[in-house]
Amino acid sequence: MLHFDSDYMEGAHPEILKRLSEINFHKYSGYGTDAICESAREKIRGACGCPEATIHFLVGGTQTNATVIRGLLRPFQGVLAPDSGHISLHEAGAVEAGGHKVIAIGNRDGKLYAGDVREYLLGFYGDENHPHMVKPGMVYISHPTEYGTLYTRQELEELSKVCREYKIPLYLDGARLSYALAAKGTDVTLKVIAENCDVFYIGGTKTGAMMGEAVVFPRFVPEDFFTIVKQSGALMAKGWMLGVQFDVLFTEGLYLECGKNGIKTAGMLREGLRNMGYSFYIDSPTNQLFVVLENRKMEELKEEVSFSFWEALDKSHTVVRFATSWATQEDEVEKLLSFL
């Protein structure tokens, strides 16, 4: 059986496993206060071009989103997000469970645009009843988006401008950030993200780490954020287990190399599918491909390949997602194409 369901199906990059083995019997202080975590932080600060950044290592993506949003918002505030966003659809109400409304705005190709954010904010403050309403307190985006699409530098700068005008933070979910950074033609780098976002996270779970995400506050950090992380169940006692993974990923460009493999193998699959006449639901330049399959073909394919259902297109066609990863092999792509 071939597996193209997601990009977190393998364990961890061999270099990470090697390093974990090397330090296995060493003893370290807990909760991210150790020297390995600090080494990882310094490497991330250097890559982001923000030497004063505060960095926390959290256990997973949903915990990270819920914790960051909880840490940034007052009890009466909500978070603006695209209606296709991960926090809007696929986190089981984790943000709402923390007491904050997700205010969904219509997406375009999975993205949230500055003009739409401005229009919502103008409408909110133009409503005389707004003191009785959930106040928009931050903006959430992901890069890549849920559709694998990418923001441009200009689009991030325009979003940042609106957020700073209204004095609300811009938060970027980077669960698949390595694949965005490695995509061909992108003009968004870690430094660009750090310049324009008030907080973002660098995803490890989907890019070679066993688990873990690195939350970066380039210029400020909410008061008592460490305590909020612990209260939210996102803090790991053996913090060095997360730190060492990011220390390895940010040594000699490994994080970007992991992303490049996902992009390369997705490119092979994309080209093969196009040559075979398949159509795409959306044009994604990253490691997630959204393909339209005839339902009978989809059922046949399930005998040999696992993949993600996305949505029913019509009575006889379905949109499915194939995801490549840091570990996808070229022969796996060739086998998938042979089944199609």
Image (cartoon, rainbow, N blue to C red):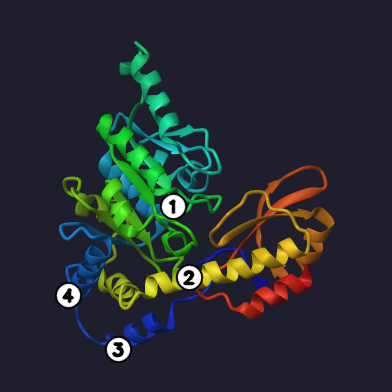
Looking at the picture, which amino acid does disc 1 mark?
A: His
Q: How far, Cα to Cα, is label 3 from label 2?
A: 27 Å
Mark 4 closeness class: few <14, some 14–19, many ≥20 residues within 10 Å: some
Q: Position of residue 18 (x, y in %)?
A: 36, 87
| Residue 312 tag number | none
Q: Which residue is mark 2?
A: 260
Q: How far, Cα to Cα, is label 4 from label 1?
A: 30 Å
Where's the C terminus, which quadrant? bottom right
Looking at the picture, which amino acid does disc 2 mark?
A: Lys
Mark 3 closeness class: few <14, some 14–19, many ≥20 residues within 10 Å: few
In the rendered image of this protein, does residue 121 appear above or below residue 19? Answer: above
Q: Position of residue 122 (x, y in %)?
A: 37, 21
> In the figure, is residue 314 to the left or right of 13?
right
Q: Is residue 210 visible?
A: no
Pick the residue in front: 139 or 5.
Answer: 139
Q: Nearer the viewer, mark 2 or mark 4?
A: 2
Q: Secondary structure at mark 4?
A: helix
> In the figure, is residue 55 to the left or right of 289?
left
Q: Position of residue 163 (x, y in %)?
A: 31, 35
* Mark toward the start of the polypeptide (2 vs 1): 1
| Residue 143 tag number | 1
Q: Which residue is mark 3?
A: 22
* Mark toward the start of the polypeptide (1 vs 3): 3
